Image (cartoon, rainbow, N blue to C red):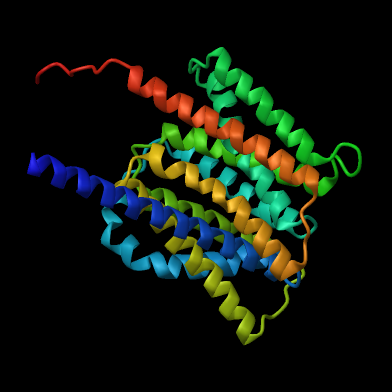
Amino acid sequence: MFAKISADAGNRSAALAGIALMLLAVWMFSFGDAIGKFIVATYSVGQLLLLRALASLALLSPVIWRHRNAFRTIQRPGLQVIRVALSTLEVAAFFAASVYLPLADVITYYLAAPIFVTAASAIFLGEKVGWRRWSAIVVGFIGVVIALRPSTQAFSWPAMIALAGSSSFAALMIITRSLRGTPDVVLTTAQFCGTLLFGVIVAPFGWITPTLPDLGLFALAGCISIVAALGVNRSLKLAPASVVVPYQYTMIIWAVIFGYVVFGDVPSIAMLVGAAVIILAGLYIFLRERDLVREEPVVVPPPG
């Protein structure tokens, strides 16, 4: 009995630690996004991605060296290249859209990515999606339309860029599912190498030599992205995904706060309503998938 109480207490402590880490990581991601938006007000997106990737890879270099054997055999290299291209496209689209749109608006479009993933899983991966989740997908798309504000600036280029980035992020997650056997260090390093290459090609056009304080901001943006990613990974190891993943939606709260405090952006009613609809649809899809996993029979592998 005491052992069971002790185990339950340990599980609760691990879950609370996982939630705390997820909340901290989401805050750091939001802070990094705000820094990136501040930087691209002066410097190009290519320059941001170049210097941010350099800082991230420098921070990752000890981990890369320790796991260097993982890079010797890379599974499905063609699909890996497509994944890196999508990763680079989505992060470039995010910061390009943030030049013209409030941070909260861009985040709102990206919150629709899990909804896009569910729809794409049914279409391209042949995964079974029942009428309940299809209904949630439709509701989520309605939330996107509401956030787009069709009566005013709907389908503006910045909004389309943000939606293209969100769609790329959804495709990235779909492909990552197919490459889940690839070590995390390989996936992460490849992503930063992709943004580094993109920056090398694009940054020379309109290059502005950064000041020393701004170089510090570039480095800080890179460090934050790595530390936040490590926080998410550790959170998922401490607690089940069903417990910690919903807390990622707190990103919209931080986006509104950073947008208002740093940039003076006042969120519109349409954006807030659209974000709420998207979040509710996304949470329903997530909880429904969790319940379906629980209902699946346990298959015992044959011996040998």
* Horizontal arrangement in the rendering, residue 288 relative to residue 159 (left or right): left
Q: Nearer the viewer, residue 8 or 47?
A: 8
Taking the spot 77% from the left edge, 67% from the top edge, the residue there is: 264
* Horizontal arrangement in the rendering, residue 145 relative to residue 295 (left or right): right
Q: Is residue 299 above or below residue 199?
A: above
In this rendering, does residue 71 appear at all? no
Name the spot of residue 70 as percent of width and height, x first: 30, 50
Q: Nearer the viewer, residue 81 or 213?
A: 213
* Horizontal arrangement in the rendering, residue 36 relative to residue 66 (left or right): right
Can you tell which quarter of the image residue 63 is in? bottom left
* Horizontal arrangement in the rendering, residue 187 relative to residue 4 (left or right): right
Name the spot of residue 239 as percent of width and height, x first: 32, 45
Q: Is residue 64 above or below residue 152?
A: below
Q: Is residue 64 above or below residue 291?
A: below
Taking the spot 26% from the left edge, 62% from the top edge, the residue there is: 66
Name the spot of residue 259 as percent of width and height, x first: 70, 62
Can you tell which quarter of the image residue 194 is in? bottom right
In this rendering, does residue 279 appear at all? yes
Of the 4 image quadrants, the one containing the C terminus is: top left
Q: Nearer the viewer, residue 236 or 187?
A: 236
Of the 4 image quadrants, the one containing the N terminus is: top left
Q: Residue furthest bottom?
A: 212
Taking the spot 34% from the left edge, 23% from the top edge, the residue there is: 294
Taking the spot 32% from the left edge, 67% from the top edge, the residue there is: 62
Name the spot of residue 115 as percent of width and height, x first: 59, 31
Count of all numbered marks drawn on residues in the image: 0
